[in-house]
Each structure stands twice: as structure tokens, then as C-alpha cells.
Image (cartoon, rainbow, N blue to C red):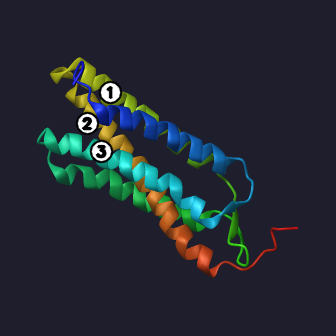
Amino acid sequence: MILHLNLLHLVLVVGAIAAVYFAVRENRGRLMRSARVFSLPLVAMVLSLILLLFQLAAHQPAWTFTIPFGLGLVGGAVRGLTMKVEVDQNWHLVRPTGRRLLFWVSLALPIAIGLEITGALIGTPGMPLRLAGAHLALLCTGLLVGRAAVLAIRLSWAPHVDLRR
């Protein structure tokens, strides 16, 4: 442990870079495999789990983390229901539209990780920063997971659109 940082903080930084990378790839508006839609929520879940474990190790009550995650799930589900999706059922391709919100949510993940690292560097007085970072990450993860869960259902029922021309 160097300056109250450990290897999990390095994993968080690499995961934040991966989250922004996956969001930029999806934000381009190009065709993608339907499984690629779920890579960003998976990375966000890993990052949030690490931040949650940091907070549980600091003896924070676990129930306080269900509120931002639940709010995020509801907001993400609403977003997943309202967004327009074109699906090629034969080639398992998808073109989601309206991805600007996804990009801003993915940029909030590095901010949450920055709050965690700053709080860890400060030490004991930085505990509110670390708590805010964990809550922000769980909110963003809830948004991404809720959106992905509704999209998983919608992708199986979406009408076929020929996207490979």
C-alpha cells in the first residue's frame, strides 16, 4: 500500500478507461453485435463492486447503497424502454440510437473513481469523498444495468431490420 492506495485502485483506473472506451464505441452509431451492448454494464458492475467492497470494509451500512442503485435501475429501465433500436435478427446486429446519455453516464464513472482515489490519498478526512464516489458509481451502474436489462428483452422481440446492405 503506497499513500493509502492499493492495486485495486489501479484496477479501478483501468476499468474506468475501459468503460469510456466501450461507451465511445457504442456512441459512434455504427452497427455492433448485440452482445457488445452488455460489455459496458459488465465493466460498470465490476467497478461498483470494488467501490462497494471498499465501503463495506470501512463499516458503512450496506442498505444505503441500495437507494442509488435502485434509482439507477428505474431510470435505466425507462431509458431502455424509450430508446429506438434497430435489430438485424439474422446476423445478431444492433444499432441503438440516442446514445448521448450513455456517454455522459460513462464519464461519471471515472469521476466516481477519482473521488475514491482522492479520498484514499487524503486519508481519514476523505471518507465522505469515498462514500460519494461509491454512491455515484452505483447510480451510474444502475442506469447502465437497467438499460441493458430492458434492451435484452427488447432485442429478442424487436422486428427484423436488414442492417447488412
Q: Residue at x 39, y 28 (%)?
A: 114
Residue 159 seen anywhere in this rendered image of the structure: yes
**Disc 3: which residue:** 50
Classify mark 1: helix, strand or loop. helix
Q: Residue at x 59, y 59 (%)?
A: 36
Q: Amino acid at mark 3?
A: Ile
State the quadrant of the N terminus: top left
Judge whether 42 appears above or below 5 on screen. below
Q: Amino acid at mark 1?
A: Ile
- Residue farthest along the left direction in this orientation: 59
Judge whether 4 appears above or below 51 on screen. above
Q: Residues within 10 Å of mark 3 (few under 14, many from 20)?
A: some
Q: Residue at x 38, y 37 (%)?
A: 12
**Disc 2: which residue:** 131
Classify mark 2: helix, strand or loop. helix
Q: Is residue 63 left or right of residue 155?
A: left
